[in-house]
Image (cartoon, rainbow, N blue to C red):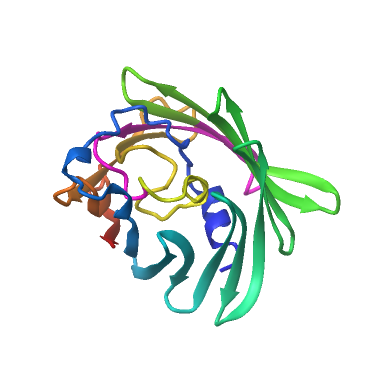
Amino acid sequence: MRKSVLIKSLCVFCVALLMSCSNDDGGKDTISNEKSVLIKKITETVYFSDGSETSIMDFAYENKILKTVTTNTRYKTEFLYDGEKISKMNYFRDNVASGSAVFHYNGDLLSYIYSEGDPDEKTEYSYVNGILTSERSGYMDENKYIIQRELSISSDNAKNITQIINKSSLTGSEIISKNNYFYDNKNHPMKFMNKYYRMVFVVEGFGGQTTNNVVSRESYYPITNEVPKYYINEIIYNNDNFPIEIKKISKESNNVISKTVIEYQ
């Protein structure tokens, strides 16, 4: 579980923090105490051809500051802070320490995360005018940084779309793919949660990096494919326009890939 958040961030097409560029005011006027809208629990079921797997994440706070996230009662992530910045995430399995990830900054921007393990892992972030434009990740081989994935991120404000070019060599040979993400104008589940945690948070149904919620995706895998595969998210919102259920569906087969249920404090 030590690698759960960081490994997941390597294995999905991450989207830049605050890159969706659509109006972030959806539902804002209906919220009497905005900053109390924090995730309490996520129950997610991922479906496979031969069955399914369900995980439950419980979020614990002190004075609205996230302190721990516990998954399936066995795995816990503990957060340490330097002011607003996350300085370290400690991982536990069955209450036994199993590793950690240290956050490094350049001013107020997250520069890289170094995760202890076998081998140690590293994820680096690059920005233009404070906007995330690239991410690369890999592992350390003695003192050499072996990069396994590189993401190039761009956004079209007029079309409310984010495009990510992904170069991956996780399986040996390099594969380049492209994904176009489209958004709603509603509130993101993590709208009022720590922005640095949002940059690394990923479950199957959503990632923490966007301003709004992904409603569809075009996937070109590999990038040379002229016809993309399409995926849609069917989202149910509460009265404050926060998602309470997200179904990720393959448009081609109409199969449900995952169902994510979100509860708030």
Tell which of 239 and 13 is nearer to you: 239
The reply to whether residue 250 is visible in this rendering is yes
Q: Which residues are magenta?
A: 165-190
Tell which of 156 and 63 is nearer to you: 63
Q: Residue at the spot x=85%, y=49% of the render? A: 143
Quarter of the image for residue 160 reads top left
Residue 220 is situated, as x and y percent measured from the top left of the image, at 43, 32
Residue 166 counted in the magenta span = yes
Q: Is residue 230 above or below residue 141?
A: above
Q: Is residue 226 left or right of residue 117?
A: left
Quarter of the image for residue 28 reads top left
Q: Is residue 96 above or below residue 237?
A: below
Q: Is residue 138 left or right of residue 10?
A: right
Q: Is residue 99 above or below residue 201?
A: below
Residue 183 is situated, as x and y percent measured from the top left of the image, at 29, 34
- For the image, the number of numbered tags is 0
Q: Residue at the spot x=44%, y=42% of the render? A: 209
Residue 175 is situated, as x and y percent measured from the top left of the image, at 58, 37
